[in-house]
Image (tube, rainbow, N blue to C red):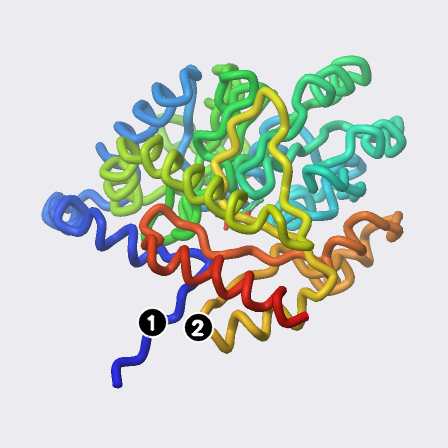
C-alpha cells in the first residue's frame, strides 16, 4: 500500500519542483560562467529586489542573521548600546544583536498580533537604547506608525526584520522600506527562498549601503583595501540566480498563501481556537499560519498520527532563547510565556494541494468533535 507523504508546515522542495527547469538552467549558467561570488547575478538581483520594493539600495549578504548584524554595525551600534527586540521571535534576531556586541533588551508582545508591544518598547527605553528591531512575524506587519513615532521621539533607529515578510505591506508600502534599514532572509522555507542561505539589507541611505558593501567583505573598499574591520558575508551567485528566477512569482505565491489562509479562517473559525486576526491597513503574507489552542499537545499528536506535521514558532523563551537569556535583564514575559504553550503552525505554502489542505481542516475538525 502506498504511504501518503507527510504534509509539512512548509515545503521548499515543492517550490523547486514548480520552477525546476528555470532553476536548473540558472544554476547551470552560473556553473559555466566561472564567476561564483559577487558576479552579475548578485548585482542584477540587488537591482531587481530594490526595484521590487521601490527603494534605492539593496545589498546582498550571506543570511538574514548577517543582514541584521551588519545593519546594526552600519548604524554604529555596538558594545555598551542597547537594542530593543521582541522576545517572541526567531533566535536569529537576538543572536544578531549579540554578534554586534550590543545588549539585546527583550520585550513582550501584543496578544492580538503576537508582534512587539509598543507600550513595552516605551517602558524599556534607557539612555543606552540605540535601536528597536520590529519583527514582522509570521508575515504580518507590525503597527509601524506607532513604532516610528516612538523611535522619532526618542532618537532611536528602527530596523525592520522582514525575514518572514517579503512582500508584506503596511499602508500599501512594502515592509522593509519604512525604517532606517530593512533586513531580509532567503532561507529556503521563506516566502522568497533560495536553495541555501542568503539575505539582503535595504535602505534609502547611500552611506549605509556603502558601509554594508564594505562590511560584508572584510571592510574592503573598491580597491580591496580594508577601510575598517568587516566579516565575510556575501550572497553567492547560485543563490542570486535562483532568487532571480523566483522573484517574479513572489506576488502570486503570496496571494496563494493569502487564499489558503482565508480558507483556514473559514474552515476553522467556529472551533474553540484562537485565530490570528489581521491588522487593519496591512497585507500579511502568511509566512506561517498560526493557531492557538489550550489543548495544543493533544492536537499536535493527533495531527501527527494523521500524517500532518505542524511546527511551533516558537517554544517558550526559556527553551527558545536559553543560551541568550543569561545576557538579558528582564525575564518576565507573561504574554509570550502564555501563548508559547498554545501556538501551532499549520501547513501553508503556495503549492499546498487542495486535498492536503482539506485533509488538515477536516482532521482538526474531527479532533474537536472528540475532545
Ligand atoms: C524573524 C527572523 N529573523 C531572522 C532570521 C534569520 O534568517 P537566516 O536564517 O537567513 O539567518 C529568521 C530566519 O530564521 C527569522 O525567522
Name the element at disc 1. loop
Q: Which mark is residue 130?
A: none
| Residue 253 located left or right of residue 215 | left
Task: Kindly identify the residue that appears in the image at 25 percent across and 53 percent down.
Answer: 16
| Residue 176 located left or right of residue 337 | left
The residue nearer to you, when weighing 235 against 22, is 22
Residue beneath disc 1? 5
In this rendering, is residue 210 above or below 83? above
Task: Kindly identify the residue that appears in the image at 52 percent across and 20 percent down.
Answer: 177
User: Label 1 near label 2: C-beta < 8 Å?
Assistant: yes
Position of residue 160 measured from the top left corner of the image (x, y, whole percent): 59, 30
Position of residue 220 measured from the top left corner of the image (x, y, whole percent): 43, 33
The residue nearer to you, when weighing 340 against 148, is 340
Position of residue 36 measured from the top left corner of the image (x, y, whole percent): 24, 46
Q: Which mark is residue 307?
A: 2
| Residue 107 located left or right of residue 98 | right
Amino acid at each position: 500500500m502506498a504511504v501518503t507523504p507527510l504534509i509539512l508546515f512548509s515545503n521548499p522542495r515543492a517550490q523547486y519542483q514548480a520552477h525546476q527547469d528555470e532553476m536548473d538552467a540558472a544554476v547551470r549558467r552560473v556553473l559555466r560562467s566561472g564567476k561564483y561570488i559577487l558576479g552579475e547575478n548578485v548585482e542584477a538581483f540587488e537591482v531587481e529586489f530594490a526595484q521590487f520594493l521601490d527603494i534605492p539600495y539593496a545589498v546582498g549578504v550571506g543570511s538574514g542573521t548577517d543582514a541584521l548584524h551588519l545593519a546594526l554595525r552600519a548604524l554604529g551600534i555596538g558594545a555598551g548600546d542597547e537594542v530593543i527586540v521582541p522576545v517572541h521571535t526567531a533566535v536569529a534576531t537576538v543572536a544578531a544583536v549579540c554578534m554586534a556586541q550590543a545588549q539585546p533588551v527583550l520585550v513582550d508582545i501584543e496578544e492580538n498580533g503576537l508582534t512587539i508591544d509598543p507600550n513595552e518598547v516605551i517602558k524599556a527605553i534607557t539612555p543606552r537604547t540605540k535601536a528597536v528591531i520590529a519583527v514582522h512575524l509570521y508575515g504580518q506587519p507590525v503597527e509601524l506608525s506607532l513604532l516610528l513615532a516612538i523611535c522619532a521621539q526618542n532618537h532611536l533607529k528602527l530596523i525592520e526584520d522582514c525575514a518572514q515578510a517579503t512582500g508584506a505591506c503596511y499602508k500599501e508600502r512594502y515592509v522593509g522600506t519604512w525604517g532606517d534599514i530593512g533586513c531580509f532572509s532567503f532561507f529556503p522555507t521563506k516566502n522568497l527562498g533560495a536553495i541555501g542561505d542568503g539575505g539582503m539589507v535595504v535602505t534609502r541611505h547611500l552611506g549605509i549601503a556603502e558601509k554594508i558593501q564594505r562590511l560584508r567583505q572584510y571592510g574592503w573598499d573598491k580597491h580591496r583595501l580594508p577601510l575598517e574591520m568587516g566579516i565575510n558575508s556575501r550572497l553567492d551567485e547560485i543563490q542570486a540566480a535562483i532568487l532571480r528566477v523566483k522573484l517574479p512569482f513572489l506576488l502570486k505565491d503570496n496571494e496563494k498563501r493569502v487564499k489558503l489562509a482565508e480558507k483556514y479562517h473559514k474552515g476553522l473559525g467556529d472551533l474553540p481556537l484562537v485565530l490570528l486576526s489581521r491588522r487593519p491597513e496591512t497585507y500579511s503574507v502568511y509566512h506561517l499560519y498560526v493557531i492557538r489552542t489550550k489543548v495544543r499537545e493533544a492536537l499536535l499528536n493527533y495531527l501527527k498520527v494523521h500524517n500532518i506535521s505542524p511546527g511551533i514558532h516558537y517554544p517558550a523563551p526559556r527553551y527558545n532563547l536559553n543560551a541568550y537569556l543569561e545576557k538579558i535583564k528582564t525575564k518576565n514575559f507573561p504574554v509570550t510565556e502564555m501563548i508559547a504553550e498554545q501556538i501551532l503552525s499549520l501547513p501553508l505554502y503556495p503549492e499546498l494541494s487542495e486535498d492536503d489542505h482539506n485533509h488538515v481542516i477536516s482532521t482538526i475538525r474531527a479532533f474537536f468533535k472528540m475532545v
